[in-house]
Amino acid sequence: MTRMIHCVKLNKKAEGLEQAPFPGKVGQQIFETISKQAWHEWISMQTMLINEHRLASYEPKTRTFLASEREKFLFSGDFEMPEGYVAPNSSSENG
């Protein structure tokens, strides 16, 4: 049976994650308050951040940065795209 939660990111009732994304207090908070859809949006954003900033995910500094950005993206609403980021636009690639 699908577990429904009130997602604080999307501000609506949505399907919850099947398990906490990682152990600990923050993982449990995400499990209880972030929907599957919002978590997948974060994973895509995290990938973009790693690529845009050319980060090595095994470095402690990178983990700290990503944790901070995850907090902003999922909970505080003050997340900003990286400076100089230009969204891909398929129409400009063809012309």
Image (cartoon, grey):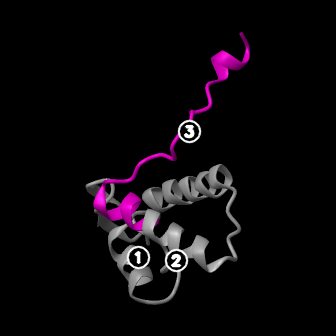
Q: Position of residue 43 (x, y in %)?
A: 56, 60
Q: Mark 2 points at which residue?
A: 21
Q: Picture coordinates of residue 5 (x, y %)?
A: 31, 68
* Callouts 2 and 1 close, C-beta under 8 Å: yes
Element on which disc 1 rests: helix
- Residue 58 in the image: above or below residue 47: below
**Nearest to the observer: residue 93 or residue 14:** 93
Specify the quadrant of the image occupied by residue 93.
top right
Q: Is residue 22 above or below residue 65?
A: below
Of tags 3 and 2, the one toward the viewer is 3
> Does residue 77 appear to the left or right of 90 in the view shown?
left
Circle 1 Cα neighbour tier, 10 Å, few/some/many (<14 / 14–19 / ≥20):
many
Instruction: Identify residue for label 1.
Output: 31
Q: Which x, y percent locates residue 63?
A: 57, 74
Q: Mark 3 or 2 closer to N-term?
A: 2
Give the residues in magenta: 70-95
Q: Which of marks 2 and 1 is nearer the N terminus?
A: 2
Q: Mark 3 points at which residue?
A: 85
- The amino acid on which the numbered mark 3 sits, given as a three-letter code, is Tyr
Q: What amino acid is at disc 2?
A: Pro
At x 48% / y 72%, what residue is drawn?
A: 67
Above or below for 92 versus 38: above
Quadrant including the C terminus: top right
Which one is nearer the viewer's eye here, 74 or 10? 74
**Type of residue at label 1?**
Phe
